[in-house]
Amino acid sequence: MPEYKLVISGSRELKGETHVSGGKNTSLAVIPAALLAEYPCQIENLPDIEDIRVLIRILRRLGAKVDWRAEEQQMQVDPGAVTSNTVPFALSQKMRASYYLMGALLGRYGYARVGYPGGCDLGSRPIDQHLKGFRALGAAIREENGMIVLEGRLRGANINFDMVTVGGTINVMLAAVRAEGDTILTNCAREPHIVDTANFLNRIGAHIRGAGTDTIRIRGVDKMRGASYTVIPDQIETGTLMIAAAATRGQVTLRGCIPTHMEALTAKLLEMGVLVTSEDDLIHVQLRQGHRAIRLSTQEYPGFPTDLQQPMSALLTRAVGTSEVIENIFDARFKHLDEMRKMGAKSVINGKIAYIEGVPELHGAPVYAPDLRGGAALVIAGLMANGVTEIYRPDTIARGYEHLESKLNALGGIIRREPVPNGNNNADGI
Ligand code: EPU
């Protein structure tokens, strides 16, 4: 795709109804998990995002047959034809979730050779807990020319994670489902997509209990069948659209969501003066007047998600008063605030705390999307701002949001893609 920028005409209220897509982070775990099965799996409600396309390239490289029908949000994965256990660095570094190929291939074949994962630059993102779990299950791990090689016949074990890790919990669960005997994982992450991945694995024959609590018990099985499975809606897309609705002082209904997954965000929006109501799979968001500053601290689920900290801090730049945002999960997740200063936002960052002083208005400016959720935060800032905002390097947003611009445009936003001359996707042309 030629390089492009997003051009946003701001100060528009979002109004109307839109549908939430399937979960990015749950899809990125369920698709590799399908490699554990002996027979084809049909996965439904998958978002049409760049990270899924990268994952398809990885699976095909391994030899798996993948039939992806993006317009039907549907994929068939046939692991029967897998001939390789190697994920080259050129592919693994394109996304974070490539680390799930370690757990899935090790669990199924007892051997995996996978390059280090990539993903958003949010500061240090080690995978020591994944490796610790694989080792405890009996894998020998070595590095070979920058590739991680994992090998061994796996046996159940008791593993306590040193810290709560979403990727680590899922990855070790993937390896353990086909290990011999029982595994008990403690200090596990409890995110909805961990439950969803466990539900999928159970559907194809795994024996997992306790996903969604901090202790997961797995009884290893030696065969897994194919099945069809529908992934849950995207919690972070839901939240991003809720925040965008509030930020534009609009009135939006989101369809196809799970309101109980949104409780931490909903509580904060209510505290700010935003009206949020829900029924069944609908969430309504409305903001009539100004909103108040708050104190916000990111935590593992069911706390306030780090992935919504960035969109939320965009909203806080126009709150009445000074907000305090504490980022506890990642050490470099405030880069969007540096960009937003160019739009008139006021913030001071001190280590893991950002103090955001609300201003009456933002103005459009050229800015860079620093990472996926930071890019979404800038889209929200652009919708709020007076005048025109140009977002450079917006392709990072398409890695994780399905058709974000068209969804926002259908609600009354004005966002268009424009080619960047000379392929220079830089605000200053450098
Ligand atoms: N950590 C370690 N060692 C490990 C694993 C994690 O020290 O072995 C630390 C991390 O450095 C971090 C904390 O533990 O400080 C939590 O990291 P976690 O493992 O939970 O994050 P992740 O697996 O790298 C996933 C999501 C992220 C999301 C985080 C937290 C995927 C593909 N990525 O990352 O999603 O922010 O969990 O919920 O599922 C995004 O979607 O924009 C995104 C960044």
Image (cartoon, helix red, strand yellow):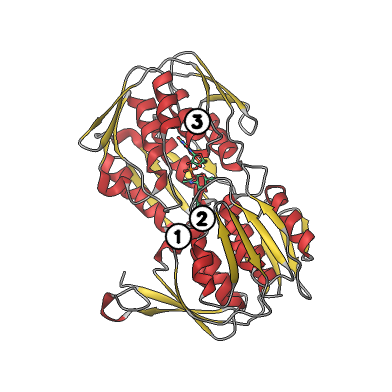
| Residue 326 visible somewhere in the drawing | yes
Q: Which mark is residue 204?
A: 3
**For residue 336, above or below residue 33:** below
Residue 344 figure quarter: bottom right
Q: Look at 57% across and 51% down and name the residue there.
A: 352
Mark 1, residues whose alpha carbon is within 10 Å: few (<14), some, or many (≥20)? Answer: many
Query: Badge 1 is on which residue?
Result: 371
Earlier-in-chain disc, 1 versus 3: 3
Q: Of 241 and 322, which appears nearest the observer?
A: 322
Q: Amino acid at mark 2?
A: Arg
Q: Nearer the viewer, mark 1 or mark 3?
A: 1
Q: Look at 40% across and 51% down and name the residue there.
A: 119
Q: CA distance from mark 1 to mark 3?
A: 34 Å
Callout 1: CB less than 8 Å from ligand 1: yes
Q: Is residue 192 left or right of residue 397?
A: right
Q: Amino acid at mark 3?
A: Ile
Q: Look at 51% across and 76% down and name the residue there.
A: 342
Q: CA distance from mark 1 to mark 2?
A: 9 Å
Q: Which mark is residue 333?
A: 2
Residue 260 point in image, percent of width and height: 72, 47
Q: Amino acid at mark 1?
A: Asp
| Residue 409 visible somewhere in the drawing | no
Residue 96 point in image, percent of width and height: 41, 46
Q: Look at 63% across and 61% down and name the residue there.
A: 355
Q: Secondary structure at mark 2?
A: loop
Earlier-in-chain disc, 1 versus 2: 2
**For residue 67, above or below residue 413:** above
Instruction: Tell me if label 1 and label 2 are in contact, CB under 8 Å.
Output: yes
Q: Secondary structure at mark 3?
A: loop
